[in-house]
Amino acid sequence: MNYSVIAKEQISFLQDFIQATDPDLGPVPKEAGPMRKRARKLYNRLRTPVRIIVAGEFSAGKSTLTNLLVGKKLIPTSVLASELPPLLFRYGQTTQIAAGWWDQKKLVPVKDVNFDAAVKMGPDFILVTTPNPFLKNINIFDSPGTSDPLSDDSKMQHLIKSSEATIWCTNAVQAWRESERYTWSSLPAINRKNSILAVTHIDLPAVKRGIDRVMQRIRKEAGELFQSIIPVAAPRALKAAPDGIVQDKEAWKEYGGEALFAAIKSIADPIREKKLVDAAAIIENQLIPFLEKMRQAGSGEKSSDTPVANASNTGSGSEPEAASKTENQPVDFNATGRKALGATPQNPLLAEWNVMTQDLISKFEKADDPEVSGLIQSSYNIVMEMTDRLTLIDPQTAEHEWITNQFQEALDQLTLMQLETGEEPLEATAILLLQLSRDLEQATTQESIPRVS
């Protein structure tokens, strides 16, 4: 299955659907709110790489193995393992880091890839981006300072809940101890189902002499618990494939790199395939029929009496219900599927926001060679300004809290986008601004929200 091509087709459709059901761009049926929310969830899920956590006890070789996966020695030796928070690795066109906090949902970029400076901020995690093509499809979570993944440490618990697969590292010197068996049996089922046992430090002289005996015992005791058991000498395998590019095929195979990445692919492919199959079912059975129903309403044709499947049950959360609209109102689609923009809203705050965003989006579209960081920083600035103003509104109703949270989450996304280059973050920023416009209009039309300015 060509995952990349199919995913791009589905993502393209979902982008069109999100735009076509945007109430800011014209009247839409009342069912559009939950259907659009489902499309946004699918869109985000398809764009998210498979998430793999690297876990194990102290001195199990987790950080060294993570360096192998990302293609370079990024995890520093100058910072004690006990001081490092979890590290999150994902693709970026340059190597950069940012400090992050789960509860505050924010990221603070750190200059010069200075891990010492990041650690001093006391973050819950450190985000690391690097231009290894492997990370376009796989996100790596590393926990260098954690010996017990089942501890009450919220940092580790958050990683486990967010991951879809696990690479458990066991030191060949004392491989697969009783404490490891106990911890492994207590992990969530999804982590144990999609799993690899990496036997590390196999290049140590004391281990090399008896590696066959060690592997025989491990396969007997843990063979049924993991999809694959791979002996690996991570430092030597890394030398064979710097920056994720194999230069010494014999060493790459001898030291376990080839087998490890093949095992990861055998786990990641079914996860990606399931995402595509699930998305295809929802697109074909719910979203496409819903768009057809909208077009029939817009052209005056009679639509089927069959309701869109589970339109009101496509998601949960605190999002306020969209403003009531007549189901059979005409919907004006142009050649691109974009609906005509309605009249300028009456709320002064919304009117000001729309002017700011439309100016920025116009810059996105007109720039021949746009400066990514500058445009995204401008977007960040106007979102920050609106967030500050929303925070000052008193009293804070449920609708206030919801729209403020929407803008705060957008700030986090824009911070991440500043770590990337290319056209994709520009497109994602434009979509994000349009979504915020819709959310703000929805919130300011609620009777409980004053006409702030």
Image: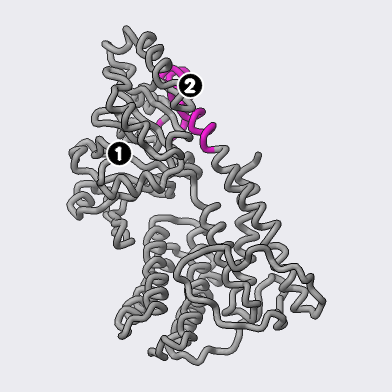
Using the rendered view, name the quadrant where residue 54 is placed. top left
Q: Nearer the viewer, residue 63 or 219?
A: 219
Image quarter where the N terminus lies is top right
Q: Nearer the viewer, residue 133 or 144?
A: 144
Bounds of the magenta segment: 242-268
Do we see residue 177 in this rendering? yes
Provide residue 130's location: percent of width, then percent of height: 39, 45
Q: Is residue 188 above or below residue 323?
A: above
Tag 1 and tag 2, C-beta contact below 8 Å: no
Q: Which residue is mark 1?
A: 149
Provide residue 206's location: percent of width, then percent of height: 26, 11
Q: Is residue 306 above or below residue 199?
A: below
First in sequence: mark 1 or mark 2? 1
Q: Main secondary structure of the magenta part?
A: helix
What secondary structure is marked by label 2?
Answer: helix
Image quarter where the C terminus lies is bottom left
* Residue at the spot 71% in from the left edge and 73% down from the top edge: 294
